[in-house]
Amino acid sequence: MTIESLLSRPVSALPTSASCAEAARRMRRQNIGSIIVEEDGAPIGIVTDRDLALRVVAEELDPGTVTLGAVMSPFPAFLTVERDLRAALDVMREMRVRRLPAVNGKGRVIGVLSLDDVLIELAEQLGRVKDLLQLERSQKDVDEELAG
């Protein structure tokens, strides 16, 4: 399974000069947990809600003046949509991150793969397996009734 169907879209991006307060307001308004940080239209980092909590709030910095460039995680790994889920999860584990941006052939961010989205998809797949097993059990019961 490739990651393309699991990507959260559209992606929200801000320049390095944007304030952390602006990023937090956008995250709240769009109900998202991360902002891609761009410079000249190219992705150079990511800021998550956790970054804001730990690097701004916990340090008692002014979110209105601290820029994303000062608190972003620079040069995160970027995935391509052709990447399969297993490889993407390996990258997440190695980097100890919950979100990874995916880029197109031109290096533009087209979506974000989040661990939450992966877990939701896996839960849905397991639900389908459960349904199949229940159907199989029901059919077995019918077959036993007819035979006996």
Image (cartoon, rainbow, N blue to C red):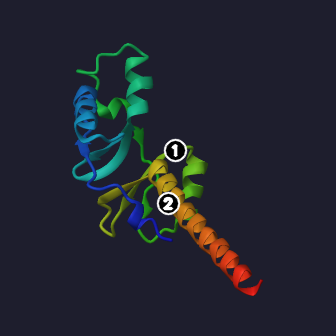
Q: Residue at x 28, y 21 (%)?
A: 63
Circle nearer the N terminus (2, 1) = 1
Say which quarter of the image contains residue 59.
top left
Label 2 amino acid?
Answer: Glu
Relative image position of residue 47 (x, y in whole percent)? 37, 38
User: Residue 146: which numbered mark, if any?
Assistant: none
Q: Residue at x 49, y 49 (%)?
A: 115
Check disc 2 and report its element: helix, strand or loop: helix
Task: Quickly name the residue at label 1.
Answer: 97
Q: Is residue 146 left or right of residue 120?
A: right
- Judging depth in this view, the residue of 2 and 66 nearest the camera is 2
Task: For label 1, count other residues whose C-alpha is less than 10 Å away and answer few (under 14), some (14-19) or many (20+).
Answer: some
User: Residue 124: which numbered mark, if any?
Assistant: 2
Task: For label 2, count other residues whose C-alpha is less than 10 Å away and answer few (under 14), some (14-19) or many (20+).
Answer: few
Relative image position of residue 88 (x, y in whole percent)? 52, 60
Say which quarter of the image contains residue 48.
top left
Is residue 90 something that shows in the picture? yes
- Judging depth in this view, the residue of 82 and 106 nearest the camera is 82
Q: Residue at x 29, y 40 (%)?
A: 31
Label 2 vs label 1: CA separation? 23 Å
Relative image position of residue 22 (x, y in whole percent)? 22, 30
